[in-house]
Image: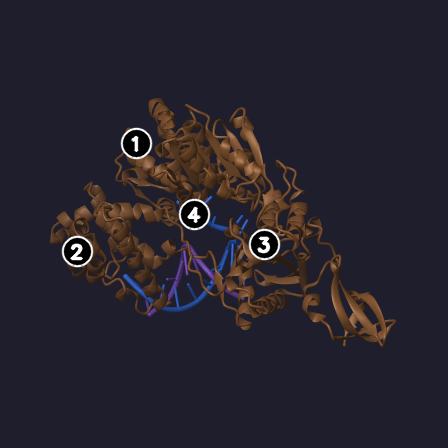
Chain colours: A brown, B blue, C purple
Amino acid sequence: MDKIFDSLNDAQRQAVEQTEGPLLILAGAGSGKTKTITSRLAYLLDTVGIPSSQTLTLTFTNKAAKEMRERAMGLITQNSFPPLLCTFHKFGLLFLKFHIHLLGRSNNFVVIDTDDKKKILKKINAELPTALIASEISRYKNSMIDPQEAYSQAELTNYKNIAKIYEEYEVYLLKNNLVDFDDLLCLTYKLLDEHPELCIQTSQKYRYIMIDEYQDTNELQLRLLQKLCTSHNNLCVVGDDDQSIYGWRGAHVRNILEFDQDFADATVIKLEYNYRSTQPILTVANALIEHNRSRLGKTLIATKTGGNDVVTLTSHDESEEAKKIAKAIRALLDKGVRASDIAVLYRINALSRSLEEGLNRGGIAYRLVGGLRFYDRAEIKDLISYLRVITNVHDNFSLKRIINKPKRGLGKASIEKIELTAMEAEKSMFEFIATSSDSELEALARKKSTQELRKFILEINELRTIASEAMYQFIDALEDRFKIKETLHGLPDESDKISNVDEFYGLFRDYVKQNPDAGLAEFLNDITLQSDQDQIEGESIYIMSIHASKGLEFEHLFVIGMEEGFLPLVGDGSDLEEERRLGYVAFTRAKSNLTISSVNSRFYKGRRTDLHKSRFINEAGLCEGSLILEKNTSFKKGDLVRHKIFGAGRVEGVSKSGREFKLLINFGGNKRDILASFVEKL
DNA sequence: GGATCTAAAGTTTTT
DNA sequence: CTTTAGATCC
């Protein structure tokens, strides 16, 4: 018990002890949110004595789940069964594994990712852009609207068409027993909604529920939570309305703003003591976010003392900006600052290019966080498709991806013919190939290809046997049969691709070691829900989008592109308050030094545009005349300077006066304090 | 069936 | 300026 309470402040302690009823913990940036939520879980299990199986803690990312699990397990002293602490989607997956049969479906479904989804949609329709349809379907699913409903409420023909595609898409998923990310949640909701007895049973099972990053939940997640709270009201949500930056993806800030309307008699506890940043940084962040109207309202208070002023940096253009940032980073590194304590953030990924050039020129190693995710890389998706076909030969979708890799002389036309004929025979493509005669196949593809296909069928069957009998041999057998690495020869970035494949093999072997009883199917579903967590700690600085930086913190932080049009970014769907929250998230990543940079002109989308400073700079109280970075380094003891009236002198001391530097200058025996901006360096 | 050209578009992205 | 998807050509 002492272990749990020792390092908590009053508000955190109150949040931990309030175990009954709806509770909203408004956790400001850097206010010890994870500590509070993990302590609360430990308190529930250890002190209150709730069986761990009766708690449920949900997060958005695997990374957050992992971190929480580790920290909670460190606090829990009772030797209890580990509590269920996972992502929303993983919970959905587990739930569906147990209950999807109630929807008349088998539980050996396969979870498809966004890429697979787009491919299916493209197959269904050739006209409309798949990205648009994918997001519309996602919106429908997250609003619990089925295809029929979507059709009847659509007014424009375009939307009627989308509803029709949505319907066909659902049929396709059902037919192939596929489940997309949204289904993991909406089918779970459907089950709870249509089966009241299951709903009550589930709610009674999870008597204590905690949700992380509540400001990022959407309508469906709220409704799901309401179902889970059918037989009790012990829902504790943790979040920060000021850090809601996923509205464009369907997150409803209103969920957190109106928590007390959704869950009656809710307690609200604010965590406003910030353990991350210095007061100057928090003052700037507080000043900025106060310009938002839709917020519950809180003010971060630093627990650290002292701290440097926030620095603003103005450059002529993006290359000068990058050069200055590189120079400042070089100075930090030379002072002995660890590279991994430094990060540069931007609103849009396109801004990384000029920055990268500057860093390269300055010889500064950087790590770009985000970008193409590991499991989204083509060569990895090919491998996954192999595994999927081996797990389930009826998976036409994955089969088509690999049927000609390595080349078996099959083109689009042959593949389509085989698919069509198989469909007519009411067989999966694999089944059809395996059971058809040579002459049947030769009518659809070349003779040589037919031979290759026979071999393919044989090899897949062999691998399936190996997978079920000796998982540890599986990867070598796979590479041996299909020569995946050889097929990558001659492709652009060949060595990168091969090392990705090797990494995947390593990952697989690790998984088998860690989960000796798991089969291929378990492995596949687990990795589909995994994001790319580049957690390799290297001697390089980090650069990333503001979105990607959420939850992270850096001793020395630079935010570039602080111009109107970039931050705030303007567009059709843009929401100024969300842009402001992005600025707030960016600023509050900084622990001790924050530098904000803007340019007068930027080259973007093939044209140079003149730009104005972001309004956020003013709103944050960083008006003109604030500290300019160069002054930091350019005046030191012993420098010769010239003053308009007093003439030349020598600097004998440097001190700070408000946002400016004050210099003690000796003008030929006459010593005076002069603001740095009134003299020039000689 | 695969390479090469052309046109259009261009935020942010957990699972 | 890129990148990417589609069309067109061998």
**What residue sits 34% from the left and 61% below the top?**
A500
Which callout, 2 or 3, points at the residue further toward the start of the chain?
2
Disc number placed over residue A590 in the picture, else none: 3
Amino acid found under the numbered disc labelled 1 = His
**What residue sits 42% from the left and 42% below the top?**
A75
**Residue at image mark 4:** A67
Q: Tell me: residue A675, above or below residue A278.
A: below
> Of all residues shown, which one is farthest toward the right?
A645
Q: Residues within 10 Å of mark 1 (few under 14, many from 20)?
A: some
Mark nearest the camera among 1 and 2 is: 1
Q: Is mark 2 on a helix, strand or loop?
A: helix
Amino acid found under the numbered disc labelled 2 = Glu
Disc number placed over residue A459 in the picture, else none: 2
Mark nearest the camera among 2 and 3 is: 3
Confirm or deny contact between disc 3 and disc 1 (CB under 8 A).
no
**What residue sits 67% from the left and 66% below the top?**
A316
**Residue at image mark 1:** A99
What whole-number distance in Å separates the C-alpha atoms at marks 4 and 3?
A: 21 Å
What whole-number distance in Å separates the C-alpha atoms at marks 1 and 4?
A: 29 Å
